[in-house]
Image: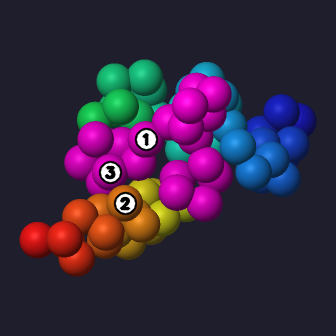
Amino acid sequence: MKAVALCFKPYLKPEEAMIYCNLGRTQLSKKCDESGVYKNNSGYFKRDDLDRMMSGVSSETEEKIKQVK
């Protein structure tokens, strides 16, 4: 039931993000580092960024870094 409720929340706690992505703690942190997904100041992940990470599309921050280079 908790997994269904996570689909409607715009921001997820790290524990909820692990459930949402079906990854362990170290796998989630490694995948987030590779794709440029970071927590906001409150310590939450944006669900849209997690969706992009899991689909393989580059994140907004990664695209901005490419524009600067």
Q: Residue at x 84, y 53 (%)?
A: 8
In percent of width and height, residue 23 lies at 46, 35
Q: Which residue is drawn at 45% across and 58% down?
A: 54
Position of 68 relative to 4 (above/below): below
**Residue 1 visible in the displayed image:** yes
Horizontal side of residue 19 vs 63, given as left or right? right
The foreground one among 42 and 21 is: 42
In percent of width and height, residue 35 lies at 31, 54
Q: Does the magenta stretch include residue 37?
A: yes
Helix, strand or loop at mark 3: loop
Q: Mark 3 — residue?
A: 36
Looking at the image, which residue sits at the far left? 69
Give the extent of the magenta segment.
31-50
The reply to whether dot 1 and dot 3 touch (C-beta < 8 Å) is: yes
The reply to whether dot 1 and dot 2 touch (C-beta < 8 Å) is: yes
Horizontal side of residue 33 vs 41, given as left or right? left
In percent of width and height, residue 24 lies at 44, 26
Q: Residue at x 63, y 28 (%)?
A: 42
Kind of residue at disc 1 = Tyr
Kind of residue at disc 2 = Thr
Position of 52 relative to 31 (above/below): below
Q: Name the quadrant containing residue 29.
A: top left
Kind of residue at disc 3 = Gly
Q: Mark 1 — residue?
A: 38
On-image quarter of the N terminus: top right
Helix, strand or loop at mark 1: loop
Q: Mark 2 — residue?
A: 61
The foreground one among 6 and 37 is: 37
How many numbered discs sit on the rendered protein?
3
In percent of width and height, residue 31 lies at 32, 43
